[in-house]
Each structure stands twice: as C-alpha cells, then as structure tokens.
Amino acid sequence: MAQMGYRTWNFEEIYAIENALHNNPHHILGPQEEDGEFYINAYFPNTCAMKCISTEGDLESIMEPVDQYGFYTVPWEKGKSYRLEAYFEDGTSYQYRDAYAFAPVITQEDIEKYQKGYHYEIYQLLGAHKRIIDGVEGVLFAVWAPNAGRVSVVGDFNLWDGRRHPMRRLENSGIFELFVPDVQEGALYKFEIRAQNGDVFLKADPYANYAQLRPETASVVTDLKGFEWTDKKWIKQRKKADTKKLPMSIYEVHLGAWKKPENGEKEFYSYREIAPMLAAYAKEMEYTHIELMPIMEHPYDPSWGYQVTGYFAPTARYGTPKDFMYFMNYMHEQGIGVILDWVPAHFPKDAFGLGRFDGMAVYEHEDPRKGEHPDWGTYIFNYGRPEVSNFLIANALYWLNEYHADGIRMDAVASMLYLDYGRKDGEWIANEYGGNGNLEAVAFLKHLNSIVDKRNDGTLMIAEESTAWPYLTRKVEEPEGIGFDYKWNMGWMNDFLDYMKTDPLFRKGKHGELTFSMVYAYSENYILVLSHDEVVHGKCSMIHKMPGDMEQKFANLRVAYGYMMTHPGKKLLFMGQDIAQYKEFDEKVSLDWDVLNQESNAKLQHYYKALNHLYREEPALYAYDTSEKGFEWINCVSADESILVFMRKTRRKGEMLLVICNFTPVAHEQYKIGVPYEGKYKEIFTSDAIEFGGSGEYQNKRMRHSKKEECDERKHSMKVTVPPLGMSIFKYMGGMDSKAGKKEKGKEK
C-alpha cells in the first residue's frame, strides 16, 4: 500500500490491472468508495489524459494519472452516471461508457443451479447477449473458465487488447462476467484466457449463437430476438400427435451438398434460398420429416459437422441464426418435421475450441483413458461434471426452444455408453463396479431425456446406437430405461446390406440376415435406416451395392426398398439414394441430379415416392410399428427360394396387407402361399410395374381368391405370380361375395 495525493493505493493491484493479471477488476476499477469519499478509477493503455463526463453533460473533470501507464482517478458524485473520454498523443480521443460501472447480472441462484447441473436456460446468461442495464445498451459477456487466472473479453470493439476489458470472476463459481456498453450486434469477439501456468491464449465462446465463417474462428455478437414465427399450427399438431402410431419417413440431408448454386458465384445456397427447394422436394416425394446432418458450427468440411466447435451456433456457411429460423419455420409451414443431428459424444481438439479451455481439462476428462477417443482424435465430454452436463442439456433444449426443432438425433451413443469403446485392454478405466458401462453418461442421457419428455410437446429424442445396450427407448421411470423415443436399427442395416450385396445365387446361405431383425424388432422403438454412413469411404452408393447388371441392380434396389418400407419400424433414407445416384456421397459437390435424365433413375425415384405414398396411406404399415400385433410371418423359411411372405396389420381385419419379397432373379407362376383369412386379395402394389422400371409381366391384375387348401401351416391359401427380384403387396378385401366372388373366380387363371 502507498499514499499518493489524497488516496491510498495498492500498486500491486494496479500492476495486476495494467498487466492483465487481475481476475476481479471491479474491485479497483469503476466507481469506488474510500473513507466516505466517492471516486471513479479507470485504466486505458497508451493514453496521455482522460476525462470523466456526466451523462447529462453538466459535469466533467480531468482525471488524475496515478502512474504513467494509463491508470487514472477522479472524485465523483455518488450515483451520478458518467462517460469516460481517453486522449492520445496523436490528438485523437475516444469517448465510452465504463464497463466497470455495473453490478453483476448473474445471480447466486443462477450459479447454484448451474453448479448442480439443472440451469436449463443457462445459454441465456453465458455467452454474449444484448441487454439494457440501467438504461444503457450493451452486451453481457460471460464464460465458465474455473481454472483461469484471468479472463478478458477481446474483440474488434477494443482492438483485441486483453488489458481493456478484464472480466469479473463471480465468487465460488468459475464464471467470469462483464457487461460492455455500446457493443453492437455483429461485433467479433473471443475470450483471452490467462492459464495458471501463465500461458495466454484466445478461445471462441462455447455459448456463442453465431460465429465467423471458416477458416476464421471468432464468435459474433448476435440477437436471437425479433424473428416472427408462424408455425403455431404445426407445433400444436405436433403436440397432439403420437408418432408411434403414425408414418414417419425421414429424408437425411447434408444441407451444403444437397444442391449447390449452378453459376459457381458462391459455395452454398443460404438457409432461406434452400428452404423452398428442399421443402418442395420432400413434399413431392412424400417424406414426413427431414433430418439435417449437423448444422452446428464446425471448422472442417469433411467432418460433415460431426466435429463441432460452436454448439449453440448454426453454421455460417448458409447464413445467420435468423436465416436458419426462417428455414425451420418454412419447413413447418409446409408440413415437414425437422430432426437435427447432435453430437454430445466428443469434440475436436482445435486450439480455439473447448479443449483444455482454460489451460486445463474443463469440458473433457484430464485422463486420456477417459477423455480422448483414440480412433477419432477427439476429446470426450466429462458427463460427471455438472457444469458440463448442464452445457449439453441446455444445448439440446436450445435447439428445441429457439429453433423449434422437432427432434434430436444423438450421434455415436455407443461411444458414450461404453468406457472401453474403441480401446484395447489397459487403455480404459472400469467404473466403480468394475464394468465397462459409463455410468456418468447413462445418468446424463436419462437426465436429458427426462427433461425433454416432461415438455410433452411432441419433440423426439433419437439414439444412433450400434450395440445391444438394453432399454434405450424405455421410459426413464421404468427399470433400466434410458428414455429415448427411438433408436436407429443399425443391426438391421448392417445385416440387410450384407445380404443385398450378396449374389442372389448365394443368398440362401444368408437367409437369416433377412429374418433375424424380427427376433428383436420390438425390444426397442426402431427406425430402419439406410444412412450416410453406408454410402461413403468406398462403401459405394446404394445402387452400386447391388449385384448383377444394371437392370438387376435396379430390380435389387426396388425389392430392397420395398422390404424396408414394409418391415416394422419408422424409415430413414439418405439423400441421393432415392434417385439411385451412382457416386458416393461427397460433401464438396451437389447430388448428381442429372441422373434423373436416365429413365431407370427417374423410374426408381418414382418408385420410392410411390412407396412413401403407400406407406402413408396404409395404416397397416405404421400403426403397430412398436407392437407385435402389427406383424406376422406367413413364410420365413424358404431360404432356397429366398422368398419372404409376411403380414402387416392393424386391429381392423380389413386393413391387413400381405407382402411377398423375392430376392432371386427367378419368377414364380402359381406360387402357393398360406393366407390368414378366407376371402379375396387384391394386389395393390408391385415393384415389377413398368412405371417403376419393372417388366410388367409378373403382375397379379385380377383379384385372387383363397382356397381351403393348407399351406404355410394355414388352413387357406392362394396362388400368385411372384416377380423376379420383386416385391408384391396384396390387400385383404374381405370374405367371398357369392355373385362377385364367382364372377372374379371365373376370370382367374
């Protein structure tokens, strides 16, 4: 302490301010009171003088320099608002409001909720948010950096100088906060962090709502308020709907590669530009939902968005946050649901991101045996840390609240559930019971899913999980339930594609890969997926997975899609596969829409549209998707013929469909199958139709009538024509009418 003029100064504290070491600058900067006297202290580097001016303009005072490095003081009237003016050697000056004249905004209650992991709207406090405090407009900056020695907010509003705006550490919280007046929307900023070891570095804001377009990495001040949503009708309908009893056909999309501008003047369409094009396509093809591969900000295009650095920021590749709100709103107005891919399993090691955020492991585990993915080169979230769990839960809710997302598809859930995922012996740490289950991740998933479920607004939680971890879609309140609404059926996808890639001559040896899915079909609420994962990295597009010449490839693809659409479970198909695109997915280029100039591709697209239409029109194909009541085998044992016959049904007898799938290029005339009911059966769909690219030679144009002849352990049977590499669907039309039945029977071959 030292006496100087009329004040007592702690020059160690002043030194800390001037050298960006102080973690509680409000203790010495801004309005101060000593021995009943009131003062204003200010620090502005590289100045030659400073002045304090009342907001009303009725008072101004030259500030006294405390030293030659830019620290000033002046007596002031308590409670009188003021501005500061800094003068420089070149004769210029700069007037500004003092950031250190404002009390903390984040309350002790906020801190306690955050530290316990249940401040579900913490994203409204942490980050950068426009506010008006005491009549002054500005931005509240706040960041959690518990191990930091000092944090400053730096940006284009303060010359990226960490000495200008050091932040206040809120007591016992690890949160640093500062309200900076007059910062405008669009301002660029980062947090300058001084680690405990003295290292100083810049980090992007983990809670930023917007960020610069890569390769730039600064966060951007933005205001999410003001967008006029017009999707109330959609939200109301969604809340009432039970998707388990409704059709759900999802179109998986990479927004930047679905369609690109043709003139080459820009890299991508904006959210606003692509919305009407994508909505029109989804409606034309009769999809119920689209699923967007991650649109959260990410630096590396070939990651497709799965290595996120900006969890609260829609990527700037396609526009602003409000542009993305427009996209979501437009989709809802067109009757299309939007599911967002979300990545809470891991995050990249980019220097400006979450990794070692304050110089130490904050969002991740310190021990690489728990904190790093050896295969992916990324960090794993520390789900057991309440502030980290809160970050992720608030993030999921943010996309539901602020962008009206209809669902969250959670990526790589298996990697979260297992401590030994992708690891060899000795590379992982067992849980407290000696097992390989990640108990902290399980608790996090249950917590998140329970909160979303309590919203009761029809939003969905979907797990992409590739193992047999039980009860993922059981309610959290039930024994061992994790609380997801749906799980991707990765087992079905792997088995089915392996079967379809096999030459039909050898498929009989893999017949179990077709039927095994029905052994566990109701153990979870499943979505059948043919996703982006299967058409990249040398795995070939769907059409090129199929064996045979091009005609056989298309026939194989038709029967494959037909089986998927009639198999229990909701549906998902990756973009480009409904037009039989030949190329693998490549994020650098648009889908090859030109293939639709070829008749075979155009007819395949028409076929998939017809399947979607049939799926939406026939309750038997979706009403009992999660119940054993909706499916029954007629014949699942004809391995030598590679034929499956099964029923899809509802409670009503008249809504029963009979499906026949033939996975060999051999046609069958007068093929006898057992039927569940005596009566008439009409073929309502066949993949062999000319309009779909088939031959048209193997259709059952006349009504088929059952006979009292046992087959497939059924008392009644009928004979049908089965197309090669084809799928046929018959609808039960009721019992035999004496006149009509005899008339139809006479026409029958």
Image: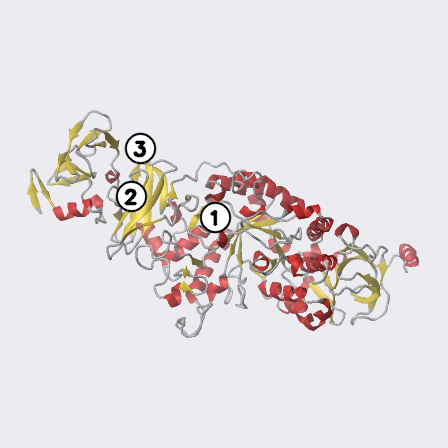
- Give the residue displayed 18% in from the left and 27% down from the top: 60
Q: Position of residue 30 (x, y in %)?
A: 20, 39
Question: In screen coordinates, is 48 left or right of 254?
Answer: left
Q: Earlier in the sequence, mark 2 or mark 3?
A: 3
| Residue under numbered circle 2 | 178
Provide the secondary structure element on which disc 2 rests: strand
The amino acid sitting under disc 2 is Leu
396 up-or-down from 5: above or below = below
Residue 155 falls in which quadrant of the image?
A: top left
170 up-or-down from 185: above or below = below
Q: Which mark is residue 399?
A: 1
Q: Position of residue 340 (x, y in %)?
A: 52, 51
Question: In screen coordinates, is 310 left or right of 706?
Answer: left
Q: Which mark is residue 135?
A: 3
The amino acid sitting under disc 3 is Gly
- Between 523 and 216, the one lying in front of the other is 216
Q: How many numbered discs?
A: 3
Q: Quadrant of the C terminus?
A: bottom right
Task: Find the distance from the CA under tag 3 to the CA under tag 1.
Answer: 31 Å
